[in-house]
Image: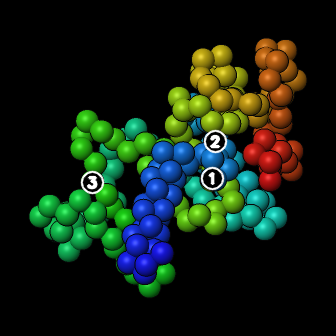
Amino acid sequence: MAPVAAVRAASRLLCYRRQFWRDNPWTIVKVFGIAGSSGSGKTTLLDRLIPRLVGAGLRVAGIKHTHHGFDPDTPGKDSWRMREAGCANVVLVGESHLTLMRRYPADTPPTLSDALALLPRDTDLVLVEGYKRSDFPKLEIYRPAHGKPPLWPEFPGIVAVATDAPEELAQRTALPVLDLADIDALSALVRRTVNL
């Protein structure tokens, strides 16, 4: 193959791989979600779960989905001005952090696949907080005392429930019920579910 043809072929393959990653992120990276109603303790559980998984040698990434509008930039700053001037993407780079700010049309919000496509390929596990309506494996945190209905009867992908009332909840669902305080069992569930 001529050098120019080889470069073109390699370029097409690279573009295909990038497109495949965008269209099929779950085939490349292990994704596990933490779901629950507001105030149930999702972030608190992640605060305890992430160090356990990282300590086991896994490269863990996190995705947090919010329905609340937010802007990570500061009005008037240079990066904000670049976005206001029309840049679709602005990368803010500091001594030890890099932040990509990508603008999406109001009628096309970013999807979980969009977020997954931004992560390094050497990521072993992505823990997702939110996207409860998406169909990937999730642990629901459910606290009966909060008086809110559980998600598991209506939302896809819930493989188990973690709770502060395991005996009570075991009577209400056929799903595995774990004690919210048992971080070893919860870590094992995550790893077993995604085959890590």
Q: CA distance from mark 1 to mark 3?
A: 25 Å
Ranked by sequence position, the earlier of labels 1 and 3 is 1
> CB under 8 Å between callouts 1 and 2?
no
| Residue assigned mark 2 | 33
| Residue assigned mark 3 | 103
Residue 99 image point, x, y percent: 40, 68
Residue 120 image point, x, y percent: 55, 65
Residue at position x 48%, y 45% in the image: 23
Q: CA distance from mark 1 to mark 2?
A: 16 Å
Q: Amino acid at mark 1?
A: Ile
Question: In the displayed structure, would residue 192 be above or below residue 160?
Answer: below
> CB under 8 Å between callouts 2 and 3?
no
Question: Farthest left residue?
Answer: 85
Q: Quadrant of residue 153?
A: top right
Residue at position x 68%, y 29% in the image: 158
* Residue 77 visible within the image: no
Residue density around tag 3, few if under 14, some if 14–19, many if 20 or more, within 10 Å? some
Q: Is residue 161 left or right of residue 1?
A: right
Q: In the image shown, does 123 or 33 lie closer to the viewer?
A: 123
Q: CA distance from mark 2 to mark 3?
A: 25 Å
**Label 2's element?**
strand
Residue density around tag 1, few if under 14, some if 14–19, many if 20 or more, within 10 Å? some
Residue 74 image point, x, y percent: 26, 65
Q: Is residue 191 left or right of residue 77?
A: right
**Label 3's element?**
loop
Question: In the displayed structure, would residue 13 be above or below residue 153?
Answer: below
> CB under 8 Å between callouts 1 and 3?
no
Residue at position x 47%, y 69% in the image: 10
Q: In the image shown, does 135 or 146 lie closer to the viewer?
A: 135
Residue at position x 24%, y 40% in the image: 106
